[in-house]
Amino acid sequence: MNFIQRLGFFSVGLIMGIGILMFFLGGKKASCDYSPNARTLKNIRNKDRVFSENALNFFSSNSLDTAVVTTILKSGNVDFSKSDTKKEPCKIYFISEELESGELEIEIENCRDKAVIKSVQKVN
């Protein structure tokens, strides 16, 4: 069996294997959240969110919707140098994201059952 025949058999098997994997894994909502930033954001996204009075005042005074927090929690950057990850019982995280309205930074108190958005501010 020469090289061209072996390459042909390999290609057929590879294509069939990829097709089978796509069939079985196509509808799954699998994610690969391995970085500390991604794991922290996913942990906060999966909890009930409570807005403090300070955060709600910021949103109303800047004509923003609280749905902005969802956008920030999907693709924001956690500033671990400012965050207090050792505080008990609730850890404090500072998350920033560049949006159309400018860069926003939110302070979140991440407790076991809920995430409290304590403050929101524009970053210059």
Image (cartoon, rainbow, N blue to C red):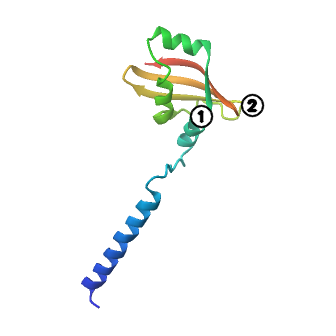
Q: Would residue 20 be found to the left or right of residue 6 on screen? A: right
Q: Mark 1 belongs to which amino acid?
A: Ile
Which residue is labeled 1 in the image?
Answer: 44
Q: Would residue 18 be found to the left or right of residue 1 on screen? A: right
Give the image location of residue 60, x and y in percent: 49, 10
- Figure check: 24 above or below 16: above
24 or 66, which is in the foreground? 24
119 or 4, which is in the foreground? 4
Give the image location of residue 74, x and y in percent: 48, 35
Give the image location of residue 69, x and y in percent: 50, 26
Give the image location of residue 32, x and y in percent: 51, 50
121 or 69, which is in the foreground? 69
124 or 98, which is in the foreground? 98
Crowdedness of circle 2 by 10 Å Cα count: few (<14), some, many (20+)?
Answer: few
Label number found at residue 16: none
Which residue is labeled 2 in the image?
Answer: 89
Mark closer to the chain start, 2 or 1: 1
**In the current view of this chain or complex, which residue is farthest to the right?**
89
Quadrant of the image containing the N terminus: bottom left
Q: Mark 2 belongs to which amino acid?
A: Pro
Quadrant of the image containing the C terminus: top left
**In the current view of this chain or complex, which residue is farthest to the left?**
4
Query: Spatial distance from mark 2 to mark 1, Cα to Cα?
Result: 15 Å
User: Who's the residue at 24% across and 83% down the image?
Assistant: 4
Q: Would residue 84 be found to the left or right of residue 98 on screen? A: right
User: Who's the residue at 34% across and 69% down the image?
Assistant: 15
- Figure check: 38 above or below 109: below
**In the current view of this chain or complex, which residue is farthest to the bottom?**
1
**In the current view of this chain or complex, which residue is farthest to the top?**
61
User: Who's the residue at 54% across and 40% down the image?
Assistant: 37
